[in-house]
Image: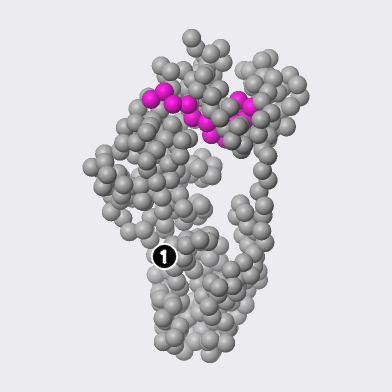
Amino acid sequence: MIHPIIRPLLTWYNLNKRDLPWRNTSNPYHIWLSEIILQQTRVDQGMEYYLKFVRLFPDIATLAAAHEDLVLRTWQGLGYYSRARNLHFAAKQVVQQFDGKFPDNYNEILLLKGVGTYTAAAIASFAYNEPKAVVDGNVYRFLSRYFGIKTPIDSAIGKKEFQKIADEILDKKNPGTCNQAMMEFGAMVCKPQNPFCDSCIFNESCLALRNNLVKELPIKEKKVKVGIRNLHYLLVFDCNANFLIRKRGKNDIWESLYELVLISDDFNEASAKLDLQSFDFLIKRKFEPTKHILTHQHIYATFTIGIVKEFSSKVLISFEEVSWLNANTKAFPRLISRFLEKSEVQKFIDGIFKN
């Protein structure tokens, strides 16, 4: 028997759903791409990246064969770069372990790198209509408010409780649309801030609204600890307009992305190998500090541009040279790419090498 909230929810969805490209396909590759991109990303921002990935990597074999640098560069600006690395790894898994065919059931989809229970349920229900309930942030919020549940959504008990409820109310004959409807309702009506309670189709039966708990629900028990980090980067050129970069290693932010010469890092001093004394500058200019906000860190970065006659062999052991004209072929963290794109930086560098 279908749960009482499902019929009005599906009716609302059919009338109000957004026209999104990954909803107009049953292609599991495209659905998987959209789900990975939309983790920690708003739909309006993710759309551009989804279309770009589909254009550059039209099938999973193309993505698997791509160089990691190209995948990361295509992802540049989305953040949480482990998603891109896992995406690339999982594409290779499909080619190597599933003969290039995307797995067609929840249990096998769950074997892919970077795919958890939520993502596997989404792909299985959207692409194959497998009766698996999807519980994302929007669903947690809607269920918490509608049923008046005060169990923290980030607790082990809470995750089991909400999954159980979602499983029980799922329309088993139409799981894909049912999941989409609940996610869409949470995103468009039962929003985190300023939800549309007055016009909500459930405003007479919602326990949170009835008990004035809308602002309090859902509840989280863990608070994100935010650290402060200071970075000082050196954009150093030789006289041929080549500058130094290197790939960041593991166990820190921006793994496998390129960075400039890191002079100081009060979070990880071991990663700052060189100081300003390593270079014999012909010209040097320091720019105003900039702030970059990540989920767990607030980064304050300063950049210095320096020009030297040539790079020493000692320096080139740890760094590689790239032409300023080819700077956009490398995948940098957004913090660095934004600095490189600044008009004042572009003018300063162009003025030096045109003279």
* Amino acid marked by disc 1: Lys
Please tell me whether residue 309 is drawn above or below residue 149 in the rendered image. below
Mark 1 sits on what residue? 330
- Looking at the image, which residue is at 31% across and 36% down? 103
- Observer-nearest residue: 299 or 350? 299
Question: Which region is colored magenta?
Answer: 130-144
Residue at 53% x, 90% y: name it.
Answer: 280
Position in image of residue 33 (x %, y %): 40, 42
Judge whether 107 appears above or below 84 on screen. above
- Residue 204 in view of the camera: yes
**Residue closest to the eye, 131 or 13:** 131
Location of residue 278 with respect to 132 vertically, above or below: below
Residue 269's spot in the image, x, y percent?
A: 59, 72
Q: Is 267 or 24 nearer to us in this picture? A: 267
At a point 68% along the width and 45% down the height, the residue shown is 223
Horizontal and vertical percent position of residue 47? 46, 42
In terms of secondary structure, where does tag 1 sit?
loop
Closer to us: 123 or 328: 123
